[in-house]
Image (cartoon, rainbow, N blue to C red):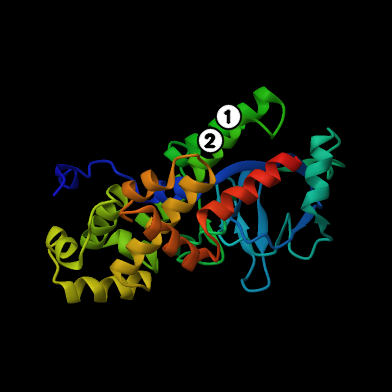
Amino acid sequence: MSDRLNDETNFDVVGDVLETLRFRGSIFFYSELAAPWGMSLEHTGIPRFHIGMSGNCFVGDDDHAAVRVEETDIVMLPTGNSHWIADQPGRKLIASQLAGEACELDSPLFQQGRITNRLMCGIVHYDQESPHPLLDSLPGIVHFAKLDSTHPIWSTVTLIDSEMLRAGGIGRTIVDRLTEVLFLQLLNYYAEQHDTASGFFVALRDRRLQRALTLIHKEPGFNWSLSILGDQVGMSKATLVRHFKDSIGIAPMTYIENWRIMKAYNLIKYGSTPLEQIAGSIGFGSARTLNKSFQRHYGYTPNEMRRRLQASDSRE
């Protein structure tokens, strides 16, 4: 057994998920606002969040009561539900896309009268061909209330704010990378602070399941079995399977197979490493085995995906 299995120090499971699924952040709205103001946001299927830099406002959707957002609050909508944000409920709403475009043209909306708010809104794109239980574990709206100005999360917000002011725009590489850091911080903070967390976050709060996930993510190419994994975390095979299913919804070996496929998808789509090498690095044994599993999971082979991507690149 690899000696590395005994060295899990500082390994970040959530960070590994975000990197493998290619989570990429950006700020799509950043402006001072004068009441009355309100914006509607369409369903996207990807996470978005709103940060109260100054002043109070409200965020709501069809399924939840409006959330009051105070200064230093962050509201996240992990599944990108359609929603609205306004200084008060009931305001006339303008599409956020129009408001964002106006900011990019240096002609921001909602500027008549006394400035009441300063708002920053972010979005996190990811490759939705590879869904993971992590986002499914989150509620429709997550409210991070009254973050202390010294908290690491707010320190990242402050860095984003400073860079936005320095660069004079929202489409900047440094801002994008900081937005990704912020999203990771929010997910980790949620996992640490919410006793009512469900799904994948329950597993992260359970010491033995968290260790199991760390081992799987740190060594996806290891020849895992229920016996080996159970011995490593101090659980019988039956107990390990039951706890995994209760929290994540699938058995450990199914999770391992799915994770290996997601790793393979990432390496195949965004790189040129030969299939045989990819297969050996993540536990498939051979390119033939990888091909079969990949086609069963996605409906097409790795080579078919690469050919489609090459054809798409040539058209551009």
User: CB under 8 Å between callouts 1 and 2?
Assistant: yes
How many callouts does the rendering have? 2
Residue drawn at the location 55% of the way across and 40% of the way down: 179
Instruction: Judge left or right: residue 84 versus residue 252.
Output: right
Instruction: Judge left or right: residue 84 versus residue 107.
Output: left
**Farthest front residue?**
288
Q: Secondary structure at mark 2?
A: helix
Q: Which mark is residue 94?
A: none
Q: Which residue is mark 1?
A: 174
**Farthest top residue?**
166
Q: x and y percent of residue 13 in the render? A: 35, 50
Q: x and y percent of residue 292 in the render? A: 43, 63
Instruction: Judge left or right: residue 205 versus residue 165.
Output: left
Q: Is residue 223 above or below residue 306?
A: below
Residue drawn at the location 12% of the way across and 62% of the way down: 231
Where residue 81 sits, quadrant-wise, is: bottom right
Amino acid on which the number 2 mark rests in the picture? Leu
Q: Which mark is residue 178?
A: 2
Instruction: Judge left or right: residue 230 versus residue 56.
Output: left
Q: Nearer the viewer, residue 118 or 307?
A: 307
Q: Is there any visible trace of residue 119 in the rendered image?
A: no
Q: Nearer the viewer, residue 130 or 246?
A: 130
Location of the C terminus by quadrant is top right
Q: x and y percent of residue 175 in the render? A: 60, 33
Residue drawn at the location 69% of the way across and 64% of the way down: 82
Residue drawn at the location 72% of the way across and 30% of the way down: 169
Amino acid on which the number 1 mark rests in the picture? Ile
Q: Is there any visible trace of residue 172 in the rendered image?
A: yes
Q: Nearer the viewer, residue 127 or 113?
A: 127
Q: Dot 1, crowdedness within 10 Å: few (<14), some or many (≥20)?
A: some
Q: Nearer the viewer, residue 48 or 272?
A: 272
